[in-house]
Image (cartoon, rainbow, N blue to C red):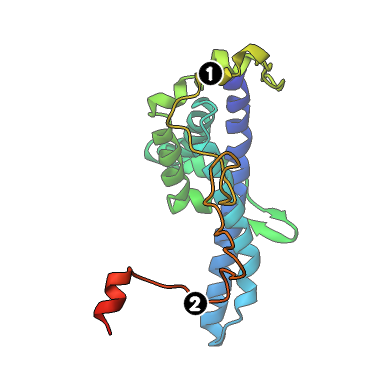
């Protein structure tokens, strides 16, 4: 089916391109010649022929570069090359077969002009060369269907299989565990030093504390 559509596209694009090229070349030539005659120019006069040539270039580019089927460029190239090749065999017969006196939107349409200057022959050869690409005759490779693409994505969360038996026992703690944080108070079971007892009427806090032994105090006298 793709070869059929490409074949039909070649049959349509070839005559349309011929007409557009004729309008563009004739309009550009007459505009530039007029500029030379009057000695001045106005560039907006070239917009219309430039549009004709631009559309023709886009159609030829799509037909020659799209990898649908090579039949389209092949048919269009042959249709554009044959008139110029006919000039080698019977030039006057070929020129007489080309319609003359046609007009498009009031503009003359000299269809023999692209044949005389060889424009159709050049474009036809370009389209014919596009058919020599081997890749154009092959089908597009199908996208590989992997198992990952066919398998639907699982959005469910993983099941929690944790049980109470997974907790480590209290006796399984190693000795390297850090000690618990404390405020620094002594343990309740730690013995403390007894307070000094009162002897007579003397209070342990009435006299300053004495340091050293009695022998030291005698030596210092």
Could you give the CA–CA distance between mark 1 and mark 2, rounded to whole angstroms? Answer: 54 Å
Q: Nearer the viewer, residue 213 or 62?
A: 213
Residue 209 visible somewhere in the drawing: yes
**Residue at image point 51% right, 38% down:** 179
| The C terminus lies in quadrant | bottom left
Q: Furthest residue to the right?
A: 105
Q: Furthest residue to the bottom?
A: 39
Q: Nearer the viewer, residue 88 or 75?
A: 75
Q: Is 32 placed above or below 113 here?
A: below
Q: Which mark is residue 208?
A: 2
**Residue at image point 63% right, 25% down:** 5
Q: Please state if 27 lies on the left or on the right of 220 as rendered.
A: right
- Circle 2 residues within 10 Å: few <14, some 14–19, many ≥20: few
Q: Which mark is residue 171?
A: 1
| Residue 106 x/y as whole percent | 74, 61
- Circle 1 residues within 10 Å: few <14, some 14–19, many ≥20: few
| Residue 9 x/y as whole percent | 62, 32
| First of labels 1, 2 by sequence position | 1
Quarter of the view holding residue 217: bottom left
CB under 8 Å between discs 1 and 2:
no
| Residue 174 x/y as whole percent | 45, 25
């Amino acid at each position: 089916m793709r070869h059929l559509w490409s074949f039909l596209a070649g049959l349509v694009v070839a005559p349309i391109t011929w007409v557009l090229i004729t309008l563009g070349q004739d309009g550009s030539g007459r505009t530039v010649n007029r500029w030379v005659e009057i000695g001045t120019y106005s560039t907006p006069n070239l917009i219309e022929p430039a549009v004709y040539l631009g559309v023709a270039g886009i159609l030829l580019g799509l037909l020659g570069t799209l990898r649908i089927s090579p039949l389209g460029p092949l048919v269009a190239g042959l249709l554009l090359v044959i008139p110029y090749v006919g000039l080698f065999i019977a030039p006057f017969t070929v020129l007489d077969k080309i319609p003359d006196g046609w007009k498009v939107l009031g503009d003359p349409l000299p269809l023999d002009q692209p044949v005389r200057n060889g424009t159709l022959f050049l474009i036809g050869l370009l389209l014919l060369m596009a058919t020599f690409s081997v890749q154009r005759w092959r089908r597009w490779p199908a996208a590989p269907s992997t198992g990952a693409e066919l398998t639907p994505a699982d959005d469910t969360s993983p099941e929690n299989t944790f049980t109470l038996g997974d907790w480590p026992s209290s006796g399984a703690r190693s000795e390297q565990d850090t000690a618990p944080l404390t405020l620094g108070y002594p343990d309740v079971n730690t013995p403390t030093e007894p307070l000094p007892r009162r002897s007579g009427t003397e209070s342990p806090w009435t006299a300053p504390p004495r340091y050293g032994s009695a022998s030291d105090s005698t030596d210092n006298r």
